[in-house]
Image (cartoon, grey):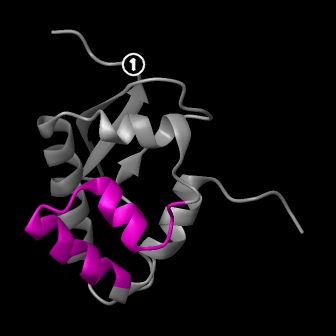
Amino acid sequence: MGPALTAVQQAQLKFSDPAVRLQIRGWHEEGVSLLDMVDRIGLSSEFTGPLREAIAGLGADEVAIIRKAMIAEIDRAGASDVAPMPVDCTLDRVSGPVAVTAAAVDGRPFAKVTNGKATA
């Protein structure tokens, strides 16, 4: 057995299922918190400690960036089983707050996640 998949990889596996994406889209429209969504799709054990704290610490604007990117990708993917999660998160480890900024990949909205909060 190979190494365990990271939380983001586990989330991507779930996101590749059109039925799960449809649920996630509805939850975004209802304003369900990101952590509640994580729990509802069965990834509570993957999203723990500092990662969970970082997600809980996201501001309303950052959550809105994620919601916009997710809904756009879900709508674009339709019933396909090929749907990349529209989150650019290449962090090896989360040890504190993260920042989420809007980005675009091939003209599609993405949420870029980096270490630390941006200062205004």
Q: Which segment did they paint magenta? A: 20-44
Measuring from the top left, give residue 76's x and y in whole percent. 23, 74
* Main secondary-structure element of the magenta-colored stretch: helix
Q: In the image, is 45 to the left or to the right of 14?
A: right
Front-most of residues 96 and 1: 96
Q: Determine which residue is flagged by label 1.
A: 116
The residue depicted at 54 percent of the width and 47 percent of the height is 48
Within 10 Å of the Cα at label 1, are there few (<14), some (14-19), or many (20+) other Cα atoms?
Answer: some
- Asked whether residue 4 appears in the rendered view, the answer is yes
Where residue 99 sits, quadrant-wise, is top left
Q: Quadrant of the C terminus?
A: top left
Measuring from the top left, give residue 117's x and y in whole percent. 31, 19
Q: In the image, is 64 to the left or to the right of 87?
A: left
Secondary structure at numbered mark 1: loop
Q: In the image, is 115 to the left or to the right of 105?
A: right
Does the segment drawn in magenta span residue 14?
no
Establish if 50 lies above or below 88: above
Q: Amino acid at mark 1?
A: Gly
Where residue 32 sits, quadrant-wise, is bottom left
Measuring from the top left, give residue 38's x and y in whole percent. 40, 62
Does the segment drawn in magenta span residue 28?
yes
Measuring from the top left, give residue 92's x and y in whole percent. 62, 35
